[in-house]
Image (cartoon, rainbow, N blue to C red):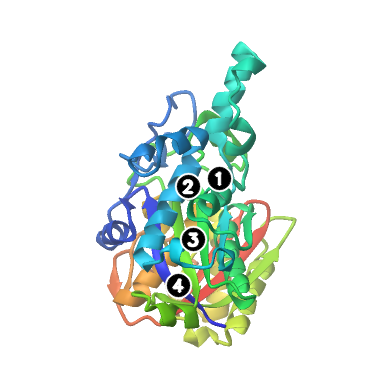
Amino acid sequence: MNALVTGLGVVAPNGIGAPDYWSAVRAGTSGLGPLTRFDATDYPVSVAGEVKDFVATDHIPGALAVQTDQWTHLGLVAAELALADGGVDPGRLNEYEMAVVTASSSGGTEFGQREIEALWRRGPRHVGPYQSIAWFYAATTGQISIRHGMRGPCGVIANEQAGGLDALAQARRLIRDGAKVVVAGGADSALCPYGLVAQLSTGNLTSAGDPATAYQPFGAQAAGYPPGEGAAMLIIEDEAHAEARGAVHRYGRIAGYAATFDPGGFAVATLRRAVELALADAVLTPDDIDVVFADAAGVAGLDAAEAEVIAGVFGPCAVPVAAPKALVGRLLAGGAALDVVTALLAIRDGVIPGGATAEPATGYHLDLVAEARATPIRTALVIARGHGGFNACLIVTAP
C-alpha cells in the first residue's frame, strides 16, 4: 500500500497555515526575533522562533485550552488545518481506521513549570488536576484522537528533532497495516525558563543577539541555533482510499525511511548509514535525489559531520542542500516534520527554498541554497538528528 500525503497543517514562527508559511519561506521571511515569552534577561539566549499573535482560544474551546499546554495547542491547530486542507471529515470515516502519531521532545514544559511553581509556593492543594496529563509526551496525540474520534492505533515518539520523521515513518507502517487515514507529525514548545534551561544543557544554543545572524547553518560564523516552537501535521492516507473519496490534494508519497542510533553522539558513519538505508528502502540511487533538506544544526562540529555525509554520498556540490529552518529556529520535534511539509511544497511548485547562509564555511563542498531556486523536483531527502545520537532520514517523491 502506498502512503500518500493529502493534507498539510502548519503553525510556525513565520506563518500559520501551510499557504502563509510557504509564502514566507519562498520570500525568505524570517520568524526569528527577540525572546518575549518570558523575561530572559538573565539567560544567555535572547533570540527565538516564537509563533506570534497565536491565541489558543481563537482556534480551540476555552475549556480545552486551560487543560493543555501551548505545545498541544499548536499541535491541535496544525491537525485541524491538515484535516481541512485534506478535505477529511473524521465524522464520515470509520473511527477504528483513523490513527494519530505525533512526536514531542519536551512535553508540556510551560504547563508543568506553572503547576510545579504552585506546588512549591502554595502547596499541593493548589496544583491543578490537569497537571497529570498536560505535561505528558502523549498529550497531543491523545487530544487530537479524542477531538476527532480517531480510535485506531495511536502513539507518540520522543527523540527530539529526529522524532518528526520517525512519526511519519510510523504512519506509513500503520497504512501498510490497514489504517486508512493517519494524522502524523511533530510539535514542540519549550520557550519557558524550565524548557530553555533543559535545552541549554546541550551546549548547542546560540547566544547571538541579532536575529539576522543568530542562526547560520554551515556558515563560517556558525555558533549554535536559536530555539523555536511550532507544529507541522500531515494527513497520511492509503492511496486507494484517497482516490475513492476524491482527495483534493496529492502532495507526494513517503517513499523511503531509515533510522540509526549512535550512543556516543553523532558519528559520520552512523548518519551516512541512515542516508544509504533510506535510499535503499525507496529503491533509489543518490542520482535520483533532487534536493536534500539538511538537519543544519548551525554548530560547527555537527555541520561538518553532516556536510561530510552529504558530500560523501552524493558527491561534492552534486545536489542542492536546503536549510529553511534557518528562518524559524530549531523547533525540536516540530522541525523535521516542518521540513517534510516544505519538501512537499517544493516538489509541488518546483522551488527549492532559500535560508542557508550566504557565507558558508570552507571545506564543506555543499551546494547550499541561500535564495529560492526554481528547478524541477521529484524527489527530496530530509535529514534529522535528535540530541543523544538519534538519526532519521525520510524520502518523499512526487505523487
Upstream in the sequence, badge 2 or badge 3? 2
Which of 170 and 321 lies nearest the eye of the viewer?
170
The answer to whether any part of residue 86 appears in the image is: yes
Which of 48 and 232 lies nearest the eye of the viewer?
232
Q: Write down the quadrant of residue 325 in the picture.
A: bottom left
Residue 288 at x, y = what percent? 48, 86
Tell which tag, 3 or 4, sits nearer the viewer: 4
Tell which tag, 4 or 1, sits nearer the viewer: 4
Tell which tag, 2 or 3, sits nearer the viewer: 3
Amino acid identity at mark 1: Asn
Upstream in the sequence, badge 2 or badge 1? 1
Residue 187 at x, y = what percent? 50, 50
Would you name the residue on which mark 2 appears?
225
Upstream in the sequence, badge 4 or badge 2? 4
Q: Are marks 2 and 1 in contact (CB under 8 Å)?
A: yes
Tag 3's secondary structure? helix
Upstream in the sequence, badge 3 or badge 4? 4
Kindly give the residue lying farthest to the top in the view shown: 122
Would you name the residue on which mark 3 appears?
337
**Who's the residue at 51% across and 34% down the image?**
67
Would you name the residue on which mark 1 appears?
204
Q: Tell me the CA gap for discs 4 and 2.
A: 30 Å
Amino acid identity at mark 4: Val
Residue 35 at x, y = what percent? 39, 34
Upstream in the sequence, badge 4 or badge 1? 4
Say above or below: 321 vs 122: below
Amino acid identity at mark 3: Ala
